[in-house]
């Protein structure tokens, strides 16, 4: 909410660990993750007022499992799923909540205070959103584990519009795998973009910073969540990121290129692998090349036929609309 002078208006911004909290989880064929996810939610010291599952017509009984837990279930057609639009649907459904916690179906709360520690950040009335730390899953490779340790360090931080001058694009890094929003602030900046290929969280956070709100990283609010992407999947994922940056060019204009962060990641990864699993260095180099090429092609996606983009990207449903 903005004041007459263009600054963020804090009146009526209720922080609060005592306010209503809703957990929102988009799902699709999540039965294989359900036992761990449900147990993680049930173990939390902060009991959410609502757990809302938005299920894309799963065929493995996901909706039934969620209902058996007493969770609220909204079923949508798979063709209607969109990273931004579906999460915005959840925000609108949870219209009495003050804090919205988003999880993905494969993110398992770690420890009993994951929710409480994340919500605690909103006691600072200037915070519009906060995300937690993602730990690598058990049996993760050195490449997979390094990615999580690099992106989700042990030290908490707070970022703002001014942070871009120091950390550039990193200042709007965020993850809806385990991220929370002050609902009133999310809605005041337009909510999640209804039709976006990737990065609905980044877009929302960028708008918050531009409007004068701050965002937080809570290192003591943790989930287990990581992926063993193949080299082809790394290419496709970075193709999608390139598409996002091409279609939302204001992100790069205002917050700078992500290339500096990318170089820092590569150097860190090589040092980590050389010290721990040097045999994985060739794979890491191939992945870096795949990411670079995928991103560059994605930035030029307007000249590519939709049918080809369907095969190039990770979020194929976006191109099948």
Image: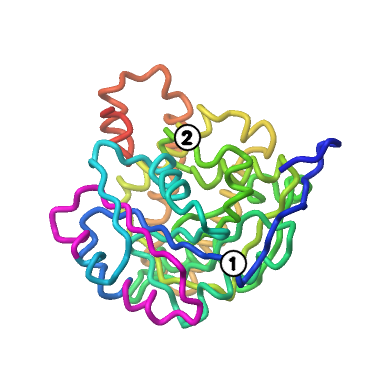
Residue at image point 41% right, 71% down: 224
Q: Is residue 87 left or right of residue 29?
A: right
Q: Which residues are magenta?
A: 38-64
Q: How is the image coloured?
A: rainbow
Q: What is the spatial separation of the Cα atoms under label 1 and label 2, in whole angstroms?
A: 38 Å
Q: Earlier in the sequence, mark 1 or mark 2?
A: 1
Q: Which residue is mark 1?
A: 19
Residue 102: where, in percent of width, then height? 46, 58
Q: Quadrant of the N terminus?
A: top right
SS under mark 1: loop
Front residue (pair 247, 265)? 247
Closest to the camera, between mark 1 and mark 2, is: 1
Along the viewing direction, whichever of 291 and 167 lies nearer the viewer: 167
Of the pair 62 and 172, the residue shown nearer to us: 62
Q: Is residue 262 left or right of residue 48?
A: right
| Residue at x 65%, y 54% (from the top left corner) | 128
In this rendering, the answer to whether 157 lies above or below 304 is: below
Is residue 1 toward the left or the right of residue 139 in the image?
right
Residue annotated with mark 2: 242
Q: Give yes or no for residue 50 being in the magenta stretch.
A: yes
């Amino acid at each position: 909410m903005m004041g007459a002078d263009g600054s963020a208006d804090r009146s009526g911004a209720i922080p609060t660990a005592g306010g209503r909290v809703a957990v929102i989880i988009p799902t699709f064929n999540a039965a294989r993750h359900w036992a761990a996810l449900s147990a993680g939610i049930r173990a939390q010291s902060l009991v959410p007022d609502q757990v809302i599952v938005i299920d894309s017509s799963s065929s493995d009984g996901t909706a039934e499992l969620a209902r058996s837990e007493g969770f609220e279930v909204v079923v949508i057609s798979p063709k209607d799923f969109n990273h931004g639009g579906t999460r915005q649907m959840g925000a609108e459904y949870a219209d009495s909540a003050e804090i919205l916690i988003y999880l993905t179906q494969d993110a398992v709360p770690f420890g009993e205070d994951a929710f409480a520690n994340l919500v605690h950040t909103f006691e600072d009335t200037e915070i519009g959103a906060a995300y937690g730390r993602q730990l690598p899953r058990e049996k993760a490779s050195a490449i997979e584990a390094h990615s999580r340790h690099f992106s989700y360090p042990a030290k908490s931080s707070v970022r703002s519009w001014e942070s871009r001058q120091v950390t550039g694009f990193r200042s709007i890094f965020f993850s809806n795998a385990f991220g929370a929003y002050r609902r009133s602030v999310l809605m005041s900046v337009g909510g999640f973009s209804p039709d976006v290929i990737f990065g609905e969280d980044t877009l929302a956070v960028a708008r918050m910073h531009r409007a004068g709100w701050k965002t937080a990283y809570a290192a003591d609010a943790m989930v287990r969540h990581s992926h063993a992407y193949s080299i082809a999947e790394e290419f496709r994922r970075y193709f999608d990121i390139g598409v996002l940056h091409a279609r939302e060019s204001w992100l790069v204009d205002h917050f700078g290129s992500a290339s500096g962060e990318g170089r820092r990641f590569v150097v860190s990864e090589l040092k980590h692998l050389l010290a721990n699993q040097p045999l994985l260095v060739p794979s890491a180099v191939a992945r870096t090349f795949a990411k670079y090429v995928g991103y560059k092609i994605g930035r030029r996606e307007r000249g590519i036929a939709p049918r080809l983009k369907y095969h190039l990207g990770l979020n194929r449903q976006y191109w099948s609309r």
